[in-house]
Amino acid sequence: MDKTFFNGLGAFETSFSMIKLAENNEKENIFLNAGRGNPNWINTQARLAFNRLIEFGIKDSKRTIDMAEMAGYTTKKGIAQRFEAFLEPDEDETDNFLMLMLDYLRFDLEYAADDVIKELVDGAIGNNYPEPSRVLPYTELIINKYLESTLYDGEKLSEKTKVFPTEGGTAAIVYIFNSLKRNHLIQPGDKIAINTPIFTPYLQIPELSEFDLVEVYIDSDPSDKWNIRVDQLDKLADPDIKAFFIVNPSNPASTAFSDEALAAVKKAVESNPDLMIITDDVYGTFVEDFRSIYAVLPYNTLLVYSYSKLFGATGWRLGLIAVNDINVFDKRISELPQDMLQRLRNRYKIVTGDPSDLPFIERLVADSRSVGLYHTAGLSTPQQIMEALFSLSHLVHRYDIDPYFLATVELIDQRYQDLHKALKFPGDDSRENAKYYSLINIYELAEKKFGKDFRRYFSTSFPHNDFLKNLAEKNGVVLMDGSGFGSREGNLRISQANLPTEDYYLIGKQIIGLMKDYYEEYQEKMASK
Ligand SMILES: *Cc1c(COP(=O)(O)O)cnc(C)c1O
């Protein structure tokens, strides 16, 4: 095969080029793209609730102006009561949820009902600039409760955490790199640690490569079920390491930090107390009793979260950055040399009277709109309200199991089991395995099915992407190349999120089938020698 086929392309771009091959596959199999992480499910309840908020909001807006297709604005006084009267909880499941939500906001959180309903309704309608810029006030409180309930494993941090909702986790990542750079928190030549394999953007972001950063890899590998290697976490104790970038549970390996790994990071930070940790916990809810590194080291950690995967909301672009009120980012800024601080005061002087004390999270907001447009920097209010509603759809269950969470976990588990059954590979049912993705090593598979000699032939006779390309071209199955994520060659990522459940057994069979084709070719070659 053409060795240059994949050269220089990122894992996601390679995947696009293979989709074309797979659609016209030689065996005329159905085309199966298990490369992407985009889920094939959606959360219905919060979406229907969003609709109802708009319907109510328009009705309420007509109380002030009602001409042609024009209405006025909602009125705050008595809005919660009018909303309650509008709902028909006995007739409609969505209205029932909205009643539960109202009770939760009023009685559990003790929020002023008119204030919070006004924020939700106006936000959904989208008739005002996002104000304050960073986040709407009740939306922040609600998101904080959600993060606490899902990611902190019992640590009470919701009242000590600030949130900046962003255009997906994607924007969160971009903003973080940009502001770390703008504020001199990461400088050329600095050492940063990354847990690999990792979601490709963390390896590819030009902000980083421009900097000639020295990357220190902290690996996980299949010999330990893709758990992060605890012995390697000692590396973080070196104060020369400025930052540690983590995806937890990881992507592509889909494995959460174990309690031992969390303890090892905590211990390393005792020797490197100013370590900046950036953790991306997008897959946290797929692990039972998940514990974010933010819950273990709140002072050191910036948290990235996204609603995309769990709620099937990639098109909405709903993500966020969260940071503790007292944090190492602010401390490091305060300790910069005077000339840098002076330049930063100039940079941010239009944002606040005293830019010296401007917290890092507000700098993120300002930088996201090139400072000059700080006053209109916030995420669109309908997006913010959608984040609040997704959060509330979970929070109304209080301490009970959330049936939606359970359904997503059961669905991907089924697909994971089917795939492994077809491959006759033992699965990993440990708590840390989020099962959102599987990484299958084709060399191990070759050895397991057809022995060591075949493995040697197979791994030395073909470029590592040959199998991946043939799987698309001949069998019609698209997977993603794990080596693009910094994992070893030969690891293929299969997403359990984006195909109908019955396809996962088929994918396993196609992988085995192609391996057999290679084996037959090998046997023929051996025979003709
Ligand atoms: C999918 C994914 C994201 C992207 O999230 P969006 O909210 O869709 O932009 C971020 N981080 C990781 C690790 C992901 O897998």
Image (tube, grey):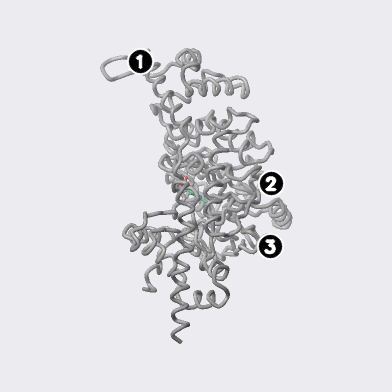
Quadrant into which the N terminus falls: bottom left
Dot in front, 3 or 2: 2
Dot in front, 1 or 3: 1
Secondary structure of the residue carrying numbered label 3 = loop
Tell me which amino acid carries mark 2. Val
Tell me which amino acid carries mark 1. Lys
Where residue 48 appears, as percent x and y from the top left, is: 44, 28
For label 3, being within 8 Å of ligand 1 is answered: no
Q: Badge 1 is on which residue?
A: 62
Q: Badge 2 is on which residue?
A: 296
Query: Can residue 347 be seen here?
Result: no
- Image: 501 above or below 45: below
Tell me which amino acid carries mark 3. Asp
Q: Earlier in the sequence, mark 3 or mark 2?
A: 3
Where residue 408 appears, as percent x and y from the top left, is: 53, 41
Q: Earlier in the sequence, mark 1 or mark 3?
A: 1
User: Taking 71 as reference, is 465 left or right?
Assistant: right
